[in-house]
Image (cartoon, helix red, strand yellow):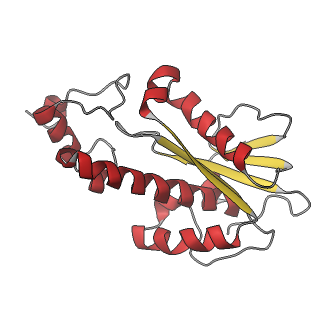
Amino acid sequence: MLSYYDTKLVVAGTDEAGRGCLAGPVTAAAVILPPHFKHPLLNDSKQLNKKQRALLAPIIKQEALAYAVAHISHMVIDEINILNASIMAMHKCIETLTIRPEFIIVDGNRFKPYLDIPYRTVIKGDGIYSSIAAASILAKTERDLFMETLHVEYPQYSWNQNKGYPTKKHRLGIVSYGLSPYHRKTFRLLNPMQSLGF
């Protein structure tokens, strides 16, 4: 059962999407929900299908007290590494919220303080707290849209389907066409030929 972290505080939940991808940005969202917000479908975005996420995203945006989404580019990821880029994206979201949170809950186990706002990291928090679940949905839907836009420019990697994750089609595209300008150059790409059984 999803719950609110503390009804006496203004709590922002934050999460990211795209950390394990080989191409494109890492995307984060931060969401402040009303304390008693509920929706029967609300859950970790990975437990939902595309149609369910598409249904929930506008509801979250409409009902949230505040929300923000931020992309950190593949170029910045290459410069500062994916962990730092993920935290940077979360910080950028929190910074642009129209309401300053009194507490931050973060999916996972790594974070860096943002200003003087207290925080807690929660492993698998997107399946426990509603605001983190909502953030995971917004981060996922916004990043998916971003990758579908890039797919128009580079259809050979099937980003409309894999969203930049290392699927077989994506690796076949790398074998055939090399890396695109949107690939994360510092990521240790496993040998595509070996991974495909060649």
How far across and how far down the image is residue 22, in percent? 34, 36
Outermost residue to the bottom: 40
Residue 148 figure quarter: bottom left
8 or 25, nearer to the observer: 25
Q: Quadrant of the N terminus?
A: bottom right
Can you see residue 129? no
Location of residue 111 with respect to 62 vertically, above or below: above
Task: Tell me what residue is drawn at x 53 percent, y 53 percent.
Answer: 139
In the drawing, does residue 76 fall left or right of residue 3? left
In the drawing, does residue 156 fall left or right of residue 130? left
How far across and how far down the image is residue 126, in percent? 61, 56
Location of residue 186 with respect to 59 vertically, above or below: above
Location of residue 169 with respect to 113 vertically, above or below: below
Task: Tell me what residue is drawn at x 66 percent, y 72 percent.
Answer: 62
Outermost residue to the right: 8
99 or 18, nearer to the observer: 99
In the drawing, does residue 63 fall left or right of residue 17? right
Q: How many marks?
A: 0
Task: Tell me what residue is drawn at x 47 percent, y 59 percent.
Answer: 141
How far across and how far down the image is residue 100, in percent? 82, 50
Outermost residue to the left: 198
136 or 95, nearer to the observer: 95
Task: Tell me what residue is drawn at x 47 percent, y 39 percent.
Answer: 19
How far across and how far down the image is residue 179, in percent? 23, 30
Q: Quadrant of the C terminus?
A: top left
Can you see residue 142? yes
